[in-house]
Image (cartoon, rainbow, N blue to C red):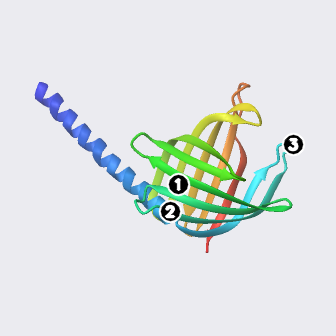
Amino acid sequence: MYRIKKLYSLVFFMYLSITQAIADDAFEKIMVSLQGQWQGELYYLDYQTQQRFSIPYVTKIRMTPDRKTLIRENTFTDPGKKVYTMEMTAMDVTDKIFEEAYFRDGKGEFFQYTLDSVDFVNDKDWQMRYSHKSTDDNRPAQIRFSVTRKNNTIESQKSIKFLDKKNQEYFVRNGYILNKK
């Protein structure tokens, strides 16, 4: 019986190791597939009017030589002025942690998310979902992101569910739709 348990443990450990290697490989392929220049629209739900607005959006994405971090240079037009932002993104697949540093107007923010799922078919067909608890509009919220690539189009969507009232539903706060140039 002891040998069977030990064999089962060994097989299970090997399964986890193989699964982890596949997850690491898929995430690296996703990161590599994002490199290049993308353009499209950034859309958002206005906090006061609840109307959806969209603005032109361009991003240039590259990887660090070790293929562990994505660097994004973003340009969009906030009514009346051009805005430049920078994002750095890294992922620890083992611990299912997705981290992002965001810089705009000389100020930075750091975000840490839980990786909820990665569905990888190939480098032009995948979806990644991640989330965290934070605040939105000064209210506690569960924030969920979904990033999907289909061929040369990427769509990202940020959905919010407020936690200060029962039976709240998710709604889309903002996102972008980009095409590879």
Residue at disc 3, secondary structure: loop
Residue at disc 1, secondary structure: strand
The answer to whether residue 136 is left or right of residue 145 is right
Foreground of the two, 141 or 124:
141
The residue at the point 47 percent across, 48 percent down is: 91
Foreground of the two, 49 or 58:
58
> How many residues crowd mark 2 within 10 Å: few (<14), some (14–19), many (20+)?
some
**Residue identified by numbered label 3:** 48
> How many residues crowd mark 3 within 10 Å: few (<14), some (14–19), many (20+)?
few
> How many residues crowd mark 1 within 10 Å: few (<14), some (14–19), many (20+)?
some
Is residue 124 visible in the rendered image? The answer is no
Q: Is residue 14 above or below residue 66?
A: above
Q: Residue furthest front?
A: 106
Q: How many marks?
A: 3
* 3 or 2: tag closer to the N-terminus: 3
**Residue identified by numbered label 1:** 127
In what quadrant of the picture does the N terminus appear? top left
Q: Where is residue 86 shown, x and y percent of the image?
A: 63, 57
The residue at the point 33 percent across, 47 percent down is: 19
Q: Tag on residue 125?
A: 2
Q: Is residue 98 above or below residue 125?
A: above
* 3 or 1: tag closer to the N-terminus: 3
Q: Where is residue 122 shown, x and y percent of the image?
A: 44, 63
Q: What distance separates the C-alpha of mark 3 from that of mark 2?
A: 36 Å
Foreground of the two, 1 or 57:
57
Q: Amino acid at mark 1?
A: Gln
Q: Where on the picture, by quarter, is residue 171?
A: top right
Q: Where on the picture, by quarter, is residue 58?
A: bottom right
| Pair 3/2: label in front | 3
Q: Amino acid at mark 3?
A: Gln
Disc 3 + disc 1, Cβ < 8 Å: no
Foreground of the two, 176 or 61:
61
